Image: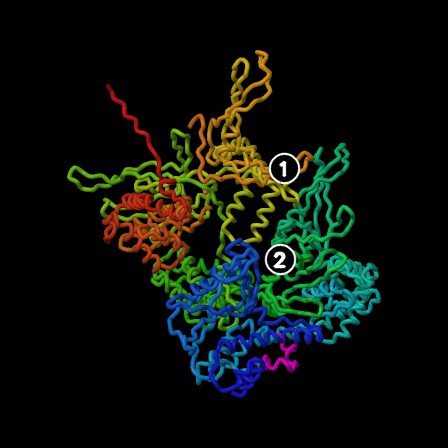
Amino acid sequence: MSLLHSFRKAASNQGLSFSDQNQEDAHEFLTSVLDQMRSLSSLLQVNAANMNRRYICPVKRHLVFEIEKTRTCNKCGDQSKRKEEFTDLSLDLIPYGSVKEMLQEYVKESELEYKCECGGNTSGQSMAFETLPNVLILHIKRFIYSPSYELMKLHDPVKLHRDLVVSSNQGDGCYSLISTFPNINQSCYMNSILQSLFAMVDLITDIMCQKPVWSSVPEAKLIRSAAATPAPVSAKSSKGGKPNKRLWKNILYGHCLKEHTNPKEERFPNINQSCYMNSILQSLFAMVNLITDIMCQKPVWSSVPKAKLIRSLMAIKDAHPSSDTWNKMSLLHSFRKAASTQGLSFSDQNQEDAHEFLTSVLDQMRSLSSLLQVNAANMNRRYICPVKRHLVFEIEKTRTCNKCGDQSKRKEEFTDLSLDLIPYGSVKEMLQEYVKESELEYKCECGGNTSGQSMAFETLPSNVLILHIKRFIYSPTYELMKLHDPVKLHRDLVVSSNQGDGCYSLISIVSHFGSNGKAGHYICDGVHPDDSLSQTTDHWLTFNDSLVRNTTGASVCEKRRESSYILFYKRHNRKRKKEPGSSMPQLMDPRTNPFDVIRTKTGPPPPPGLLTPGTFPNINQSCYMNSILQSLFAMVDLITDIMCQKPVWSSVPEAKLIRSFIAIRDAHPSSDTRNKRSLLHSFRKAASNQGLSFSDQNQEDAHEFLTSVLDQMRSLSSLLQVNAANMNRRYICPVKRHLVFEIEKTRTCNNVLILHIKRFIYSPTYELMKLHDPVELPRDLVVSSNQGDGCYSLISIVSHFGSNGEAGHYICDGVHPDDSLSQTTDHWLTFNDSLVRNTTGASVCEKRRESSYILFYKRHKPVWSSVPEAKLIRSLVAIKDAHPSSDTWNKRSLLHSFRKAASTQGLSFSDQNQEDAHEFLTSVLDQMRSLSSLLQVNAANMNRRYICPVKRHLVFEIEKTRTCNKCGDQSKRKEEFTNLSLDLIPYGSVKEMLQEYVKESELEYKCECGGNTSGQSMAFETLPNVLILHIKRFIYSPTYELMKLHDPVELHRDLVVSSNQGQIRIVSMFERFPNINQSCYMNSILQSLFAMVDLIMDIMCQKPVWSSVPEAKLIRSFIAIRDAHPSSDTRNKMSLLHSFRKAASNQGLSFSDQNQEDAHEFLTSVLDQMRSLSSLLQVNAANMNRRYICPVKRHLVFEIEKTRTCNK
């Protein structure tokens, strides 16, 4: 109470109304508190600067956002924009409305009085979020003044969203509700505000972390009072209602404050632009094994005068944790002086290159090796150079003469690699670029002048791999320039060598900030010394000279893309510790390979009743479980990850499966048969909670058991994440991290041909019979039409099992969603309601010969994926795949690759200048057409056929007719085009420009008759699928300057062209559906429909047309099922399937009952209903100024020409 009284008194310095004992408005109190905190910002920044610190206002960082207000004159259209900062928004209450609707009402355009220079008196004002805050505070206006000026409260209810998506000019923000309070009686307005403020953990943490700045400032009494306020009501223990101090300490991130204090002692002062040296030292100290190795050999180098560099380095290491700045400055000065004996440039006061400094230090330490080895021999010791042991690796360079093929090999030692920067590339790509073959001049004995040189790692560094990114280059005028292009930083890296692969993880980054190499600033980011690579805390530190801050590895890799300069990767160390005098590994070490237990077992065999360590007894045909457990225990990283997160799952009752699993893991090396049998029995019982078949005594399928265990572990993820959050920890599902994978799929546009085999006929007694005769199912099919052939491949089969059409069971077989038709894996899935099995296409075609009922054939994919020269097409399709995503980084990388690929024939597109869009389009299309011959040959080798998409869809022919004006003789020729360039007609229309293009013109031409002029007319011989028209807006002036024509032209929405002959893919996961009252016929049809990606995409793109039409309930139900397809919510799926079957029964009532129905009749009914809605949806689309094209008609409908010939 005393503290609350002090806080209210402090808050009343600027708002005196809060000092009395009356009830006050909570929103006004909150606004006053935040404004006072912001007003202290300038004063605290000055105080922080005096302390060599930096102060950032927590309110501004976490709560402030900007709104852009645009005022538009209703008369002249003149606009003016201004931005305002807010800490909260006051929303007008909409009775029975939602928070989202009130936000929309706030930002929508409104009328206001405003006198414009044009004479207008009114303007429209619209608002939009320019930026978004960390915490968004919304105030609902519940108090208004009546006509008699009495303050009234509005009690109308509003809908409160748990989650809210807010759009801004810089992107969308997703918010979750963390605190809300009513306006209650008496003085609890302040308590409510404090409760809400304390719920903003990031804000409170930020204030506490800057305590040294505001603690001694008299004017900051308000902040001190808030920090001293005790735990809010929400931070109470469950017993006795007393404040839970431990919980409140966690809410305030007390442990984080401690981490903010200790790292300060590991800082280095900046002595005359020594940031380059400080950053290198922090990175060197992150190499624990290297530093430990140096320390262990201290007796060797401590007494050698020339080893001053090593002594200085270790002296700094010893003083690293201390807070004695003066001592550190002296040691740093000595170290720089020692490092300058061979590199004098480091002795002056200028900014130096961090990589050169690192290289110089390591080279000097290596050069001392011989001297220290001699000194060690004199002491009867052995000295091994730490740099050579931990950092040095060899690269084998192979030179091959291009004329005779003669090879010569040599090996070189390195301590680091300098990689050429690839804009928007990754570290992996730069490594690949380094070792790929290159051309060099070399005179061979055979007379050849050129050779190819390839490189490969002969050995890998045993501890740390250092990579240097070349960000500094010399310009043509020999000025040192910096490259600011971003690169992708891998947290983990696998490097191959001639002696095997090595797995490395990022532990430190040295970054450079500045415009060139002669100035700027270096900082270092590194793994926290208390962390390990296997932990999930991802705790890193940023060392900025004397400033040390906490951060995360993910944040570092994101922020240092444009500034990263030197990367330090540490090799994974999975060696296990052994107890003295024993060959058995420590039982509780999760990194221990369980199979090593058997290999290291020595001595006589175990006595009766005991097992060989590392094995399991077979309890009632449990070999399937034993085999799976052995395989899981071989996944060391998975086991380690589970063990590291033990505090999260150990106390959760639902995590019994994980506890049983780890209990078996702990008992794995033992030989206690009784204990193991008990643990295996408990584990099988726990695994049977969702899969009951594992609880009996029968033999089970090992794959099903494995899938069940992993699925249950994944299903616990949400629950354990909540528990971890309560413990201020983070939980990441080990199964998802180590076993789950995604494969990027290529989107293509294909059509589907549906074939129904009539297996049900009526007998002479009108009984429905089924034909079980086998048919041959071709995997590929060529269908001829009047307009050409179509090549199709089988993607799905609906099969029926049973004796007649009134009973039985339907299943569906389909291509695996991660497979493509051109792959050789032949991976298929069999969907039997809630049971999904893996199979192969060959097996399906063999097994379904007697039961196949409906066949789905899809057009072939292109054949360009494996042709190196088709890089342009691959880049284009990759951009198309990434088109719907919000990953800007990936898009920039893909666009860079596409421009590079497009520049192979048009070099002008490779630079950074603005280029002509029409020239770029023409160049791209011409390159794609030029690949046609090569791809046709490749397609023939694959027993396929390639048709150039550009030629099929864009190319058209124009027939040019030349007529002699004297004799009338005509000559005709045809030319192919992908686009037409039209002369601009000011204020004309596209139709007029086309007519001008094809109209007859005069040209000079000598005819055999003696005539000198001819008339030339043009006409379209054929028409394309897409007609591209280029309007010539750029012309050259008489002085040869490129000018633009700004004359307007009329653009037609529709165009009729006469001639002489007058698709993003939704990657859908194949998921299961429950069987609700014999609904297998519907489930199978839905699975097949969802395999028609283009059809689904077409329906989705026209959602605005059918979403609001009541009669289109069938389409809405269909898409709702499609959206829920990848989910595992069975209850939701059952509800959606029931609604869809009900909607499908409006015209076909037979589908509304609970009986088994015919799958083909159901499919036909659904498609017919969709087609019947076409007219209605076209009218609705016209009202919306849109156009609707029936997806069924576009993708599935085809015509058959029936010719009847009289035999007479």
Looking at the figure, which quarter contains the C terminus?
top left
- What's under tag 2, amino acid-wise? Tyr
Outermost residue, left side: 765
Residue 369: image quadrant is: bottom right
Q: Residue at x 71, y 71 (%)?
A: 320
Q: Residue furthest bottom?
A: 2
Q: Secondary structure at mark 1?
A: loop
Name the one closer to the observer, 1079 or 384: 1079
* Residue 601 seen in this snapshot: no
Name of the residue lying farthest toward the top: 1009
Callout 1–callout 2 Cβ contact below 8 Å: no
How would you classify the magenta stretch by its main secondary structure?
Answer: helix
| Residue at mark 2 | 504
Q: Residue at x 66, y 43 (%)?
A: 911
Few, some or many C-alpha atoms within 10 Å of disc 2 (few <14, some 14-19, many ≥20)?
many
Q: Which mark is residue 980?
A: none
Please say if 620 is above or below 1199.
Answer: below
The stretch in magenta equals 209-226
Asked if residue 969 lies left or right of residue 836, the reply is right
**Secondary structure at numbered mark 2:** strand
Query: Residue 423's spot in the image, x, y percent?
Result: 64, 50
Q: What percent of the width, then of the height, locates residue 1070?
A: 40, 50
Q: Amino acid at mark 1?
A: Gly
Percent across and percent down for residue 104 are 45, 62
Q: How many marks?
A: 2
* Callout 1 crowding tier (Cα within 10 Å): few <14, some 14–19, many ≥20: some
Residue beneath disc 1? 906
Residue 211 colored magenta?
A: yes
Q: Earlier in the sequence, mark 1 or mark 2?
A: 2
